Amino acid sequence: PIVCVGESLQQRETGVTFEHITMQLKSAFAGIVPEQLRRIIVAYEPIWAIGTGLTASPQEAEEGCQHIRTVIRKLSSAKTSILYGGSMNDKNAESLLAQPDIDGGLIGGASLDPEKFVRIINAANQE
């Protein structure tokens, strides 16, 4: 399964992004044992970036994914993949995927254009 977490624009602007994400993760993982957590993928997908063409800056995306990783480490030592999914596209994929806590992308509308999707794949395959 892929568990998507993220904040609204109002939550971001009022400074409660991390508290909101923590609450979402703890709710989603209540009753999940550590070995199950290993099979779950988490996607940081800010609500304000879904289908809007807006995307978090690489730094904002990294901060969100880093926070997710920190919360998950407190729950389990299992390694969990963390994706960024807020309007990643062929123009911003390389800078987003270069962030240390972003393991991949959850691609929406940008996957509908094969040429653009190939550019995202190529960005993901860079060292």
Image (tube, helix red, strand yellow):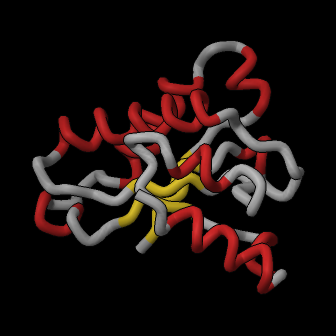
Q: Residue at x 59, y 19 (%)?
A: 16
In-image side of 26 versus 63 (left or right): left
Percent coordinates x, y for residue 50 in the rendering: 78, 54
> What quarter of the picture does the C terminus occupy?
bottom left
* Residue at the outermost bottom position: 114
- Of residues 87 and 4, the one nearer the viewer is 87
Q: Residue at x 77, y 46 (%)?
A: 49
* Residue at the outermost right position: 52
- The quadrant holding residue 12 is top right
In-image side of 10 versus 78 (left or right): right
Percent coordinates x, y for residue 93 in the rendering: 65, 55
Q: Residue at x 54, y 57 (%)?
A: 4
In-image side of 70 versus 49 (left or right): left
**Image position of 23 with respect to 93: above or below:** above
Q: How many marks?
A: 0
In-image side of 19 versus 10 (left or right): left
Q: Residue at x 30, y 35 (%)?
A: 71
Percent coordinates x, y for residue 18 in the rendering: 49, 26
* Residue at the outermost top position: 14
Percent coordinates x, y for residue 1 in the rendering: 41, 74
- Of residues 5 and 31, the one nearer the viewer is 5
**Image position of 83 with respect to 24: above or below:** below
